[in-house]
Image (cartoon, rainbow, N blue to C red):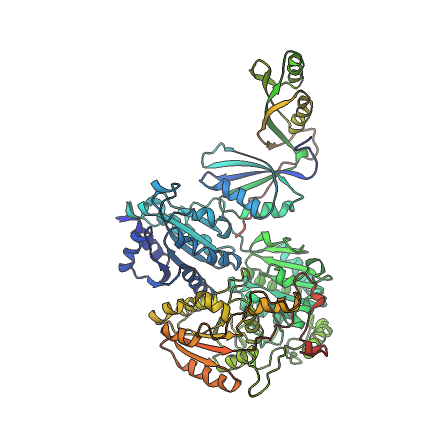
Amino acid sequence: MSVYGADKRHHTLTVLVENKSGVLARVAGLFSRRGYNIFSLAVAPSDNERFSRITIVVDVESAPLEQIIKQLDKLIPVVSITELDPAHSRERELLMATVDAGPDTRGQVIQLVGVFEGKIVDVGPDRLTVMLAGAPSKLDDFEDLISGYGIVEMQRTGRVALPMLERADRAHPRPGTTHDTEKAG
Amino acid sequence: MELTGAQALIKSLEMQQVEVMFGLPGGAILPVYDPIIDSSIRHILVRHEQGAGHMAEGYAQVTGRPGVAMVTSGPGATNVVTPLADAYMDSIPLVAVTGQVATSSIGTDAFQESDITGITMGITKHNWLITDGADIPRVVAEAFHVATTGRPGPVLIDMPKDVAIKPMEWYWPEPSDLDLPGYHPVTEGDPALVREAAELLLAAERPVIYAGGGILKARAAEALRELAERTGIPVVTTLMARGCFPDSHPLCLGMPGMHGNYTAVTAMQRSDLLVALGSRFDDRVTGRVDAFAPEAKVIHVDIDPAEHNKVRRADVAIAGDCRLVIDELLFALGALGLPHSEATRGGSGGAPSDAPPGAPAAAGSVAASFPRQRLVPWRAQLSEWQQRFPLVYDQQPGSGALKPQFVLERLRDATPDDTIVVSGVGQHQMFASQWWRFDHPYTWVNSGGLGTMGYAVPAAIGAKVGRPDRTVWAVDGDGCFQMTAQELVTASSERIPIKVAILNNAYLGMVRQWQEMFYGERYSEVYLSPDLPDYVGWAESMGCVGMRVDSTEEVDSAIDKANDIDDRPVVIDFRTDAFEKVFPMVAAGASNDDIIVDPSQTGGDR
């Protein structure tokens, strides 16, 4: 089961916000009261201590992306919003899972983690905790395969993303569209 | 200079030229009330904090300046939630200052603690919890800046008690000291889009200007008039925009929407170009959205870009201040060859003409030349609708039941043209909006978006405080009046001589109307007694003059008597017909094409 495949319902917004208390509540509150669905949300300090970056994967079927962006932009602590089209951005996510891995299956689980270039971070008598960082679709594939062994517990961080860099061989580079020139009153 | 946080807060309000605030003290805000004694700011002590919020709104709506309400923590703060939500819906600049428990107690469920910044996040433009006294002047300056610029709206400043007590070093911030890196409201429209809009305007055959409350917020009434007169395009004024374009003007079609008049509603439905200026395609205006104005292209000017394409996709969406964009539009129209009209700004100015509402334009004036010539068939069609479907009611003379519309017409004719009318929410509000003739901006104050019953009395008090030179009449329903009438005690003790006309039909009239029309006349919990309370006795106990009017013959003398009283509030209990309904009506969820006119206009019985 794919939580976030690369289908067209999802868009990633990276939102630069003032690093003040209550900002996350304002953003989350806006989504809930306007009926916008969030698929994932990741918050962390940015390279400037005045600001934090919120990466939100939104469901654009719950509301038009234009409305979501414009309403977000009206929040006073929101400084800028960059819309990242999945086809023109690098998206990564971290997955951690504790998996059943008794003597019979342990070797297979370790092998599978190796194929996906993941890591074993904890070992118990009949369980392993593994981690994997990568593109969300890769994590989806891993999750599908590993679930056959029995997932005891799993966490995914939600994705973070940056626009693709311009390259000489790419005729029409398309960095993210930044909405910070005009602010709502 | 060292001040306490409380002194700094009051001084900051003084620096913002606040002349009056409405409030009620309590434990957590106590320190802030002490320096009020020595302040130049007039404080009006309300009887319930909701009243403080609505008074501040009424004040703001008639003066264009931010209203200020000050209350304590916990229940004081939650009692201003309704006014904040109301001001958020109607884009009214309102600054609420709430007391808060000491910072060390926040989060401990302390006495009279409530998370008011959390509660009001969704109904304020922004709010602040001050945790450091050094932030006070800057936060006050930011709060007023945010409340009054861009799309205006309410803000809230939460002031913990210890921050108010502790000393701080006074300063006053320069504009560049404001810490709002994410707030840059737009003002001027994109010239390319303005030109596109101008071209659409000149090409349209059935255009309608759909003027909303943004015209008043932008102080764009004169600019709107010039646009209408130069182009000859008729204007509908929404509930929030009544008065922004004179009802007596030949191009004025009056109010559209659920209880709008037939011509205003149908003009929009048949239009080929809607010029939405500071209006937001509210569901009360559009009816069923997918059936709204099906043939119309849309130009949408709004200072809040989030309104564009929210309800209706715009062909040209211009983000900007209505006054500036209309001026740009006029310039662009001139560049495209549209001549100036004879009667524009500086001519007849804002004065009303003598023409009755809806009268066709005098030949040779606005309809004289290009592109107005193109609009002649459209204007003729509008005139025909106006003649076929005027607003009507049937007042039987003598002892027949008193019609609310009759009362409003008599009241309208007996008061000065620039009288400020304030209403609550329900039938009386719709009757007032329909039957008053608004010829001046800022003469109509009501709760539009939120539909807050009980708005009229406190908002009228705030309006009278803001414009003491004007006559202020609250037109209220009996249900609404009972919600906030206690503020008449405030009005009496503060010598604020408002006048209140209660259209007392002994029902929650609008709900009753819906139950009659859509619930098979099953009346559920809508009956209020005409005599309980005794409105005259109640008014007099609150220091007002109270009068009661039962029949048509008593109407004029009571109004005249009320108009002559200027030293105390007056309340008239008009006993009106409980069975009168507001028409026209577009049923909830119905298309505007299915407008229900007065039964007398379809040949049926009333």
Residue depicted at 59% across the width and 83% down the height? B395
Q: Residue B104 sits in which quadrant?
A: top left
Q: Residue A84 sits in which quadrant?
A: top right
Asked whether residue B238 appears in the rendered view, the answer is: no
- Return the residue nearer the eye: B157 or B150: B157
Residue depicted at 51% across the width and 42% down the height? A79
- Return the residue nearer the eye: B258 or B587: B587
Residue B444: x, y in percent? Answer: 51, 70
Q: Quadrant of the C terminus of chain B?
A: bottom right
Q: Residue B576 sits in which quadrant?
A: bottom right
Count of labels in the image:
0
In the picture provided, is A12 more to the left or to the right than B219?
Answer: right
Residue B543: x, y in percent? Answer: 36, 74
Residue A112: x, y in percent? Answer: 67, 17
In the picture provided, is B462 more to the left or to the right than A126?
Answer: left
The image shows residue B277, relative to residue B165, as above or below, that is below
The image shows residue A109, relative to residue B551, as above or below, that is above
